[in-house]
């Protein structure tokens, strides 16, 4: 398999650009995954404190704020992303 085959490019020059940019994307994805894991750990601290005090795991008014934050920054797909993040951080409701 050549770099051109692997990238879908039609020239070696374009294949080089794509290969380099894919390395950056893989590095960014690793950082994003690390941040999601960090977010989940912080979220767990909050949930444990609330449950330990007799409250509920979920706080819907706060979730509305989180959804709004992502929607304002990223538009409608931001809402879907935030919903997925919330599920990763507190499980399904
Ligand atoms: O901010 C809170 O109160 C949390 O529990 C954190 C968090 C979140 O991961 O953003 C998780 C569950 C709640 O339903 C709301 C938000």
Image (cartoon, rainbow, N blue to C red):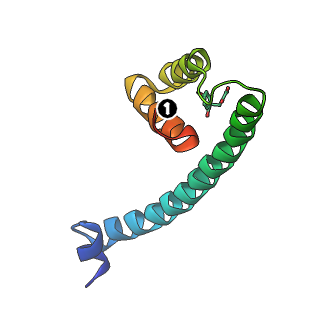
The residue shown at (57%, 50%) is: 32
| Viewer-side residue, 38 vs 4 | 38
The residue shown at (38%, 23%) is: 76
The residue shown at (67%, 38%) is: 43
Q: Which image quadrant is residue 12 in?
A: bottom left
Looking at this rendering, what residue extends furthest in the bottom direction?
1
Tell how many labels. Answer: 1
| Vertical arrangement, residue 62 with respect to residue 11, above or below | above
The residue shown at (60%, 47%) is: 36
Looking at this rendering, what residue extends furthest in the top direction?
61
Q: How far across and how far down the image is residue 48, in percent?
A: 73, 38
Looking at this rendering, what residue extends furthest in the front direction?
54
Q: How far across and how far down the image is residue 38, in percent?
A: 68, 49
The residue beneath circle 1 is: 82
Q: Which image quadrant is residue 75 in?
A: top left
| Vertical arrangement, residue 10 with respect to residue 81, above or below | below
Q: How far across and how far down the image is residue 40, in percent?
A: 63, 45
| Viewer-side residue, 82 vs 92 | 92
Characterize the local packing of mark 1: few (<14), some (14-19) or many (20 or more) Cα atoms within 10 angstroms: some
Question: What SS does tag 1 mark?
Answer: helix
| Vertical arrangement, residue 82 with respect to residue 68, above or below | below
Q: Quadrant of the N terminus?
A: bottom left
Q: How far across and how far down the image is residue 13, in percent?
A: 34, 69
| Viewer-side residue, 73 vs 52 | 52
Q: Quadrant of ligand 1?
A: top right
67 relative to 43 in the view: left or right: left
Q: Is mark 1 within 8 Å of ligand 1?
A: no
| Viewer-side residue, 5 vs 68 | 68
């Amino acid at each position: 398999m050549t770099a051109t085959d692997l990238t879908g490019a039609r020239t070696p020059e374009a294949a080089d650009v794509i290969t380099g940019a894919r390395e950056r994307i893989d590095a960014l994805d690793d950082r994003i995954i690390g941040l999601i894991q960090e977010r989940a750990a912080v979220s767990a601290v909050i949930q444990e404190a609330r449950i330990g005090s007799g409250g509920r795991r979920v706080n819907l008014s706060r979730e509305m704020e989180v959804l709004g934050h992502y929607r304002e920054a990223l538009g409608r797909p931001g809402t879907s992303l935030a919903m997925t993040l919330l599920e990763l951080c507190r499980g399904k409701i």
